[in-house]
Amino acid sequence: MARPNTLTPATISAADSTLVYRIEDNLYVNLTDRCTLACQFCPKHNGCTEVKGYELELGQRPDAEKIIGLIGDPKNYNAIVFCGYGEPTLRLKVLLEIAHWIKANGGNTRINTDGLGNLVNKRNILPELGECIDALSISLNAQNEEIYNRHCVPALSGAYDAMLDFVEQAPHYITDVSASAINGLQGVDIDACRQLSEQRGVKFRQRELDVVG
Ligand code: SF4
């Protein structure tokens, strides 16, 4: 695959800002609009295709070369964050290709994930992520399966336990791991979510309802 020889700051057109978009010092990458959850608090499931002023509905899913061309020099950003309008680990091969390129060119990488990458890919993907991902932010979302299923509506059975196992395994491969839950969602006990996270050796981040990012 062709790669740019020199890294120049990329100019990102309005059309391309669906694929990569800047929030503060980070560049966000939107690899897919698919995921196996249907979170009731997700913009996608509330008729909204825009996040922080960026239109995120994908016409087609981008390949690695397209995203790499749009990133330009990854050192221009605090981190390149795989996030977007769906679950990045559903496109694991493309994600890994881009992340390895970012690391080879001096950048930092983070994934914002639902923590179901092992369940969906039917194997432990953390060793592969550990080779090229600096930080993971995992949506824990609830202190038990009942509340999780109510808010996140997983398509796959066993999602909650698989997510918790992912949270527990992640620090063995990646040093900077945090889990999050949203304050203000009915039935969500933030303190219990914090405890579940800390018991598994990861930091906890409290998010607020209707605040994206
Ligand atoms: S996992 Fe993320 S993208 Fe998928 S429905 Fe939930 S909030 Fe939306």
Image: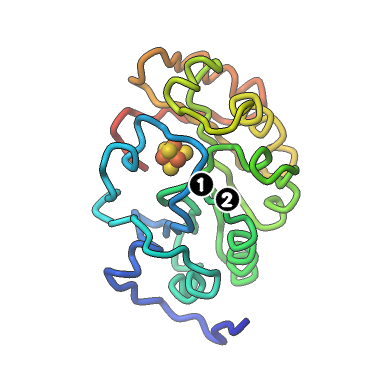
Near mark 1 (Cα within 10 A), the count class, few <14, some 14-19 or many ≥20, is many
In the image, what residue occupies the spot 49% across and 22% down? Answer: 149
Q: CA distance from mark 1 to mark 2?
A: 6 Å
Q: Quadrant of residue 119?
A: top right
Q: Reply above or below: 106 against 108.
A: below
In the image, what residue occupies the spot 54% across and 75% down? Answer: 65
**Ligand 1 neighbours mark 1 (CB distance < 8 Å):** yes
Q: Amino acid at mark 2?
A: Leu
**Ligand 1 neighbours mark 2 (CB distance < 8 Å):** no
In the image, what residue occupies the spot 36% across and 20% down? Answer: 185
Q: Which residue is mark 2?
A: 90
Q: Is residue 124 left or right of residue 161?
A: right
Is the C-beta separation of discs 1 and 2 under 8 Å? Answer: yes
Residue 87: assigned label: 1
Q: Is residue 213 left or right of residue 133?
A: left
Q: Quadrant of the N terminus?
A: bottom right
Residue 117, image x and y in percent?
63, 43
Per the image, label 2 sits on a secondary structure element best described as helix
Q: Quadrant of ligand 1?
A: top left
Residue 193, image x and y in percent?
52, 19
Q: Reply above or below: 38 against 183.
A: below
Q: Nearer the viewer, residue 93 or 194?
A: 93
Q: Is residue 158 left or right of residue 110?
A: right
Q: Amino acid at mark 1?
A: Glu
Residue 133, image x and y in percent?
63, 53
Per the image, label 1 sits on a secondary structure element best described as loop
